[in-house]
Image (cartoon, coloured by chain):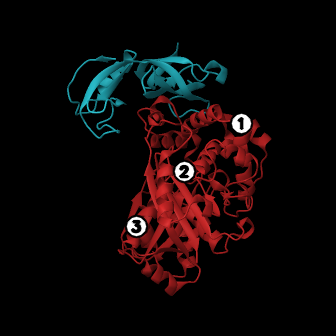
Chain colours: A cyan, B red
């Protein structure tokens, strides 16, 4: 885990989170009191209540925890179906993230445990890819 | 704390309705007032639960309802908590009557969306998710629950057919409910052969988009005794929360808010799940009912799907689950659903449920959640 700063994060980190995702990474916050790891969009630690965090950039690779293959999509996704929406666990961290994964036709294409990675963030939110 | 009672209940039919949202909201309210045998002027506050009033060009529904009831001076408010709006509204009304602020209040849940079409509803409902992580990335509600279903089927010894049996059972119950959206019996093959919406969930694993309104009159026990013999006591009330996004949950086969709400409600009631005769639970998707019945303590974790397949949750099975037909068959007008569950419990416990009556029922429970269970309320009721 690489720590890029030790500042106290006060305002929304969504722009930085999005920039990190575009580079294939996940911006996380590690609680300086209890070490609990969170996605960078939280303001207080869910374990100890502290708001003192260290930013950390995690590599956006991991394994599929669960997913669905969307065949009746919401607006904006009509031309993309079928696609998967995936919950993944990041590497060896106790941290999960979810996102869009294109071109998945059937369950055999994406077994639970399959290796996936964050590749982008655009109007489809966090975009994932099979490794 | 005052003892709180449900004095009357009313509901429109659920389904595709022609009338406007304000009209159906007033209709259900009038039904509840007449069923309770009270005058509108005895109502001291109105609690209206609704999510997408904007779809039928009417938000701020409270004053419209109150004005049509001839009590425009009566205070009211609207409450939105996604698909859990109805039970949250009921809870706020309960708290205010219990605290002694009001003797009698109106709680009406309502929704009118079917005229907007499936595309609109699928998209707008996805705004109830943690949108940055879920809706924005293409996850619809069927998709989110399908992800829970896949986790459940992966983790436990259960099959898609087991999940389908929940839909079959709820359609059997809804067949007996004159106000249900679908009054049609289905088979496991019908579910398995229906179109895939978000794998592994198929169309018949999913509840419909419905219009409808449901209403109850809530009051303190003194008021109830003065007005009617047919009332039901609210003996437990609990609420809880879960991480808004599925990715924030340690397990995807349980809904934390249900457990928190149930624990609080059981504690207040001084009973356990074993004392409950029947329950109306939030079966927006077949997998949800399975998870609910486990989280509420009716079945061990991982065994709910098999229990459903074995008929334990049928009408007058070991525990009757969703005798109304549930969201799946009775329908799911999202702002009304939580109140509609309480209407069903009231009717069951006061001998007004006809062919779908749970035999010798004394204690009924409702569990209603918002989104993927990010918020939940559980209530427990006892006949007098």
- Side of A108 relative to A38 (left or right): right
B227 above or below B134?
below
- Residue B352, by quadrant, is bottom right
- Residue A43, by quadrant, is top left
Q: Position of residue B221 (x, y in %)?
A: 47, 80
Q: Chain of mark 3?
A: B
Check disc 2: other Cα within 10 Å, few if <14, some if 14-19, many if 20+.
many
Q: Which mark is residue B113?
A: 2
Disc number lying in front (1 or 2): 1
Tell me the residue that label 1 is attached to.
B159
Check disc 1: other Cα within 10 Å, few if <14, some if 14-19, many if 20+.
some
Q: How many marks?
A: 3
Q: Is residue B207 visible?
A: no
Q: Chain of mark 1?
A: B
In the image, what residue occupies the spot 50% across and 81% down? Answer: B224
Q: Which mark is residue B95?
A: 3
Q: Position of residue B148 (x, y in %)?
A: 57, 37
In the image, what residue occupies the spot 57% across and 62% down? Answer: B365
**Residues marked 1 and 2 touching at CB (< 8 Å):** no
B197 above or below A58?
below
Judged from the image, the secondary structure of the residue bearing numbered disc 3 is: helix
Q: CA distance from mark 3 to mark 2?
A: 30 Å
Q: Position of residue B91 (x, y in %)?
A: 44, 63
Callouts 1 and 3 on one subunit: yes
């Amino acid at each position: 885990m690489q720590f890029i700063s030790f500042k106290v994060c006060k305002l929304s980190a969504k722009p930085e989170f999005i920039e990190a995702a575009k580079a294939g990474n996940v911006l996380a916050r590690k609680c300086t009191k209890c070490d609990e790891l969170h996605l960078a969009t939280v303001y207080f630690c869910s374990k100890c209540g502290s708001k003192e965090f260290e930013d950390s950039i995690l590599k956006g690779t991991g394994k599929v925890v669960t997913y669905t293959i969307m065949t009746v999509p919401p607006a904006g996704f009509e031309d993309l179906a079928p696609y998967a929406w995936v919950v993944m666990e990041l590497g060896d961290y106790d941290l999960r993230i979810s996102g869009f994964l294109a071109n998945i036709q059937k369950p055999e294409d994406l077994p639970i445990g399959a290796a996936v990675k964050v590749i982008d963030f655009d109007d489809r939110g966090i975009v994932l890819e099979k490794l | 704390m005052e003892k709180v009672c449900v004095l009357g209940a009313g509901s429109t039919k659920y389904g595709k309705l022609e009338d406007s949202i304000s009209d159906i909201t007033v209709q259900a309210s009038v039904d509840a007032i007449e069923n309770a045998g009270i005058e509108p002027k005895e109502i001291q506050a109105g609690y209206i639960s609704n999510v997408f009033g904007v779809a039928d060009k009417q938000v701020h529904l409270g004053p419209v309802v109150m004005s049509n009831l001839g009590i425009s001076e009566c205070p009211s408010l609207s409450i939105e908590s996604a698909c859990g709006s109805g039970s949250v509204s009921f809870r706020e009304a309960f708290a205010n009557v219990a605290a002694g602020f009001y003797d009698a209040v109106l709680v009406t849940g309502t929704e009118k969306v079917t005229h907007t079409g499936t595309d609109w509803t699928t998209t707008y409902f996805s705004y109830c998710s943690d949108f940055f992580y879920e809706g924005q990335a293409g996850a619809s509600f069927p998709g989110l629950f399908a992800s829970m279903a896949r986790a459940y089927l992966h983790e436990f010894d259960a099959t898609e057919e087991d999940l389908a049996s929940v839909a079959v059972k709820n359609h059997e119950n809804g067949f007996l409910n004159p106000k249900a959206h679908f009054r049609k019996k289905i088979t496991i093959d019908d579910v398995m052969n229906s179109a895939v919406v978000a794998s592994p969930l198929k169309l018949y694993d999913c509840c419909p988009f419905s219009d409808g309104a449901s209403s109850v009159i809530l009051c303190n026990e003194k008021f109830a005794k003065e007005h009617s013999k047919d009332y039901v006591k609210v003996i437990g009330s609990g609420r809880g929360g879960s991480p808004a996004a599925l990715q924030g949950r340690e397990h995807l086969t349980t809904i934390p808010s249900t457990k928190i709400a149930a624990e609080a409600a059981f504690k207040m009631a001084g009973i356990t799940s074993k004392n409950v005769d029947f329950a109306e639970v939030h079966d927006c998707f077949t997998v949800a009912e399975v998870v609910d019945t486990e989280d509420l303590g009716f079945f061990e974790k991982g065994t709910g799907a098999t229990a459903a397949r074995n008929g334990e949750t049928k009408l007058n099975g070991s525990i009757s689950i969703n005798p109304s037909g549930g969201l799946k068959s009775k329908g799911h007008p999202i702002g009304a659903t939580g109140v509609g569950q309480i209407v069903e419990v009231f009717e069951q416990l006061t001998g007004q449920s006809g062919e779908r009556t749970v035999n010798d029922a004394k204690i009924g429970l409702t569990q209603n959640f918002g989104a993927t269970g990010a918020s939940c309320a559980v209530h427990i009721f006892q006949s007098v």
